Amino acid sequence: MKKQRYAVIGAGALGGLYGGLLARAGFEVHFLLNRDYDHVMQHGLQIDSKLGDFHLSDVHAHASADTMPPCDVTILGLKTTNNGLLQDLLPAPTREGGLVLVLQNGLNSESDAAAVVGPENVLGGCCFLCSNKVGPGHIRHIDQGRIVFGEFGDRAIEVTPRVQRICDEMVSAGIDAHTTDDLPKTRWKKLMWNIPFNGLSVVLDASTKELVDDPDSVALVEQIIREVHAGAAACGVTVSPKSIATTIDVTRTMVPYDSSMRLDYLAKRPIEVEAILGNPIRAAQGAGFAMPHVETLYRQLKFLNQRNQNG
Amino acid sequence: MKKQRYAVIGAGALGGLYGGLLARAGFEVHFLLNRDYDHVMQHGLQIDSKLGDFHLSDVHAHASADTMPPCDVTILGLKTTNNGLLQDLLPAPTREGGLVLVLQNGLNSESDAAAVVGPENVLGGCCFLCSNKVGPGHIRHIDQGRIVFGEFGDRAIEVTPRVQRICDEMVSAGIDAHTTDDLPKTRWKKLMWNIPFNGLSVVLDASTKELVDDPDSVALVEQIIREVHAGAAACGVTVSPKSIATTIDVTRTMVPYDSSMRLDYLAKRPIEVEAILGNPIRAAQGAGFAMPHVETLYRQLKFLNQRNQNG
């Protein structure tokens, strides 16, 4: 079967890594770059990864979506806070009907892409990944790396051939890729990590290690995880209760890591507070379930984000 | 009627001000001082107050409780985090049976003093006061000033003559003093301010003005106030629902103010997290009522306090 052509929008910690791995494996991958365009055109992409460091000197880099060719799969790794740009960025690479694979954080993060290209052309997934962009065109992948994705919306009940094909290609490129026939479950499970660890790392100015090492923060982390787990259940999404303990245990074994939200906050970028906390709160509320611990964190983060953006 | 003799233990923002006002009015007031002893012996006490600035050159200062005479009323203004000292500090001034008036923050803050001098010798009260110690023997009283106090424990059902007598003396000294026949209500009402504004001022590193000016923090403040109000009700304490709005409105009209907990935190002193948050949470829990917003704040504060004390 002919290899599919990929686009990567948001070539940061996530898009840079997965796109880079696909390109290394011989896939045609087109990267949309913003500030890093000149650097990558000159110096290529550098990936430092626990899977082995590598360098791509010959990158299909684009300074504008308009120069991108039609692609079979557009990987969306942009921060959700930039989703206002999707109506300008997605039409070009999807103009011959390709798919958009939304790997953004949060709940219902597929909706914004779906509004541009139609829900039937959207897949969604979560990355369990410790990776940071450490410089222009320079990604450092320090731990984990799993990606789980599948159909979105009404179609999220089976693993379709188009999902399986992308997964097979990713696996052939050395990516720890998995399919899911239950995207909502995958997203809520990820939220069980993202909400406490992203949220508290900003509010308490702490690394994941500090949060799991202190008895009070770890007690709060666990309360929040339980609340998110129950919020998922209220929304009709059953996550195994084992995941409550696993989420903390996995973090204990992780290398000390600055969550993406903390890095955004420290760099004075907007934080993904609506995608990661606001949307799940509203989804649970719509199902008649309140998440007061999460809500406290949400309000605190909005206050801090507002001050951070003003200051 | 003969004027009563007063002791002040903890001559800071609160004890320094009220003790100073009593001394200015001609009451015999004995101050127990710690680091400020030498300074106050040499330079006296300086009170900058919205009631008028004044200076006391001739102060009954004590470097140790052992030199204090028996007093009719011992005003306890020490931070609750120092209550381990009470067994050494209270016996001397109360040795002929005087009363202890506990003006410390929090819920059940009278219990520690009661364990030393017996509950029948303890009164309790709350100060609604913006006052800071700004230097050795130097108090700055910037806003408010009301003090409300009454009998503690089983006696907290009427205004006894001994309570009325202290109140009359305070009023004669220019203090905005009031009696209460319902100390639990007074304490919970104060907690409706203290929990959100002390707690969030530390976690969000913000002044009271910042907290009431931002829509997200003020929404969280209101949720917390409602939760504390409901927690009081669960404990059988009925605070008028009007107090929910009043608590925020009063803060809007206050001069921008650093809460005592924030000042303690910034000065790397232990914060009163158990008295102000832990005790109310446990009291409500004992009555079968959970306060998840407050609990989130409590865990966050304990984490921050621990790190602050270690660092």
Image (tube, coloured by chain):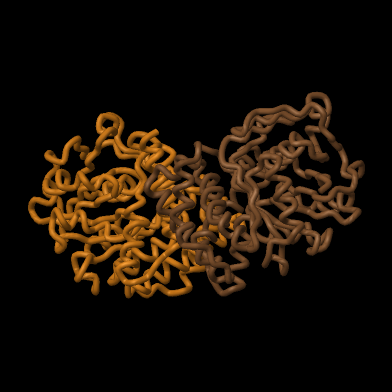
Chain colours: A orange, B brown
Residue drawn at x 30%, y 39% as measured from the top left:
A56
Q: Is residue A159 left or right of residue A174?
A: left
Task: Residue lying at the far left in this picture: please name it.
Answer: A96
Residue A168, relative to residue B134: is it above or below?
Answer: below
What's the residue at 75%, 59% (across, down)?
B161
Of residue A273 and residue B34, the one placed in the foreground of this image is: B34
Please determine whether, in this image, residue B110 is positioned above or below residue B211: below
Q: Position of residue A193 (x, y in %)?
A: 44, 60
Residue nearer the viewer, A81 or A180: A81
Query: Is A285 placed left or right of A96 in the picture?
Result: right
For the point 25% across and 36% down, which residue is it? A34
Tell me if residue A217 can be seen: no
Q: A211 above or below A135?
A: below
Q: Nearer the viewer, residue A191 or A299?
A: A299
- Residue A254 placement (x, y as % from top left): 51, 55
Residue A149: x and y in percent read 29, 63
Instruction: State the residue lying farthest toward the top.
Output: B43
The number of numbered discs placed on residues in the rendered structure image is: 0
Residue B205 visible in the shown view: yes
Residue B137 percent across, percent down from the top left: 74, 31
Q: Quadrant of residue A119?
A: bottom left
Please name the residue shown 69% across and 51% down the image. Answer: B104
Quarter the C terminus of chain A occupies:
top left
* Quarter of the image with the N terminus of chain A in it: bottom left
Q: Is residue A181 left or right of residue A118?
A: right
Query: Can you say whether B295 is above or below A288 in the image?
Result: above
